[in-house]
Image (cartoon, grey):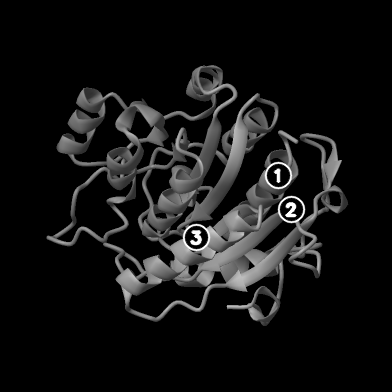
Amino acid sequence: MRFDEAYSGNVFILSKPSFEESDAVIYGMPMDFTVSFRPGSRFGPARIREVSLGLEEYSPYIDKHLEEVNYFDAGDIPLPFGNAARSLDMIEEFVDKLLEAGKFPLGLGGEHLCSWPIFKAMYRKYPDLAIIHIDAHADLREEYEGEPLSHSTPIRKACELIGPSNVYSLGIRSGMREEFQYANESGMYMAKFEVAEPLKEVLLELKGRPVYVTIDIDVLDPAHAPGTGTAEAGGITSKELLRAITMISNSDLKIVGSDLVEVAPAYDPTEQTQIAASKFVREMLLGWVNKNK
């Protein structure tokens, strides 16, 4: 797929027209084929872009303007509807091309299984990779109803790929007992219920390392983000997630890529989920792209 032909429709606010000159590339992963409750996150990337037009380009959190970041919106990867395995291969191939071109990949989901092929591509480029996972769900199952390709499995797959001690999960408040037992026994880091406070410890531990950050919008309480497939009561506020993103921006971490997944617009007619997601993406662009150059 040629990057200059990848997209038709809206782009994220202030996206630049040139792929070649960009430092970061936004891309969508319109896949929700393995969800266990409510589908619809395949429409998330497009709506996040659309509502971004209501954002201010300036961030008072870190005193930066989107004009200071050179990013290109490549649009949605044209995934084959219903074919999860082929879709994952296409995402992996796409991210491989971004990394070969020296771009910072910022993915929009789509279900959380979309992160699995990204982990594989990132790990090939960064053998000492660590993953920060911000989510309501542990996502540590080996399979769901007999299916290993499930949105409840990507973090277990990540642990098996890069080693559990290199995976840091925050905000977790839902999962099978066996998932929490695995977290306790495997050596991975898991902070339950909160994100910002435990993140302080993680930032110190990962100082200087290449880190990939994956954010599931359902880490937010449904009061702040009802537009998601598997909402979980008892979550954090959008203010806390913004604080966490800013903490990462101000840290010594080498952020090498990120994604934000599981926005399902149909379940939020108020659009607060999509609006929050677009603001998080703005802060990720401003704070994480080029932060180590």
What residue is shown with label 3?
Answer: 263
Height in image: 256 above or below 128?
Answer: below
Q: Secondary structure at mark 1?
A: loop
Residue placed under numbered mark 1 in the picture: 289
- Residue 254 in view (yes/no): yes
Sequence-wise, which precedes: disc 1 or disc 3?
3
The quadrant the C terminus occupies is top right
Residue 71 position, x and y percent, is 75, 58
Q: Quadrant of residue 292?
A: top right
Marks 3, 2: nearer the viewer: 2
The residue closer to the viewer here, 167 or 265, is 167
**Mark 3 / mark 2, whichever is N-terminal:** 2
**Tag 2 residue:** 23
- Residue pushed farthest left? 146
Asked if 121 appears above or below 185 in the picture, the reply is: below
Percent of width and height locating residue 135:
42, 42
**Nearer to us: label 1 or label 3:** 1
What amino acid is labelled 2 in the image?
Asp
Q: Is residue 272 visible?
A: no
Amino acid at circle 3: Val
When asked about the image quadrant of residue 143, the answer is bottom left
Q: How far across and down, in percent of the image, does residue 287 sit?
A: 72, 39
In the rendering, at what x and y percent does residue 258 appear?
56, 47
User: For the residues carrying marks 1 and 2, which lies nearer the camera in this image?
Assistant: 2
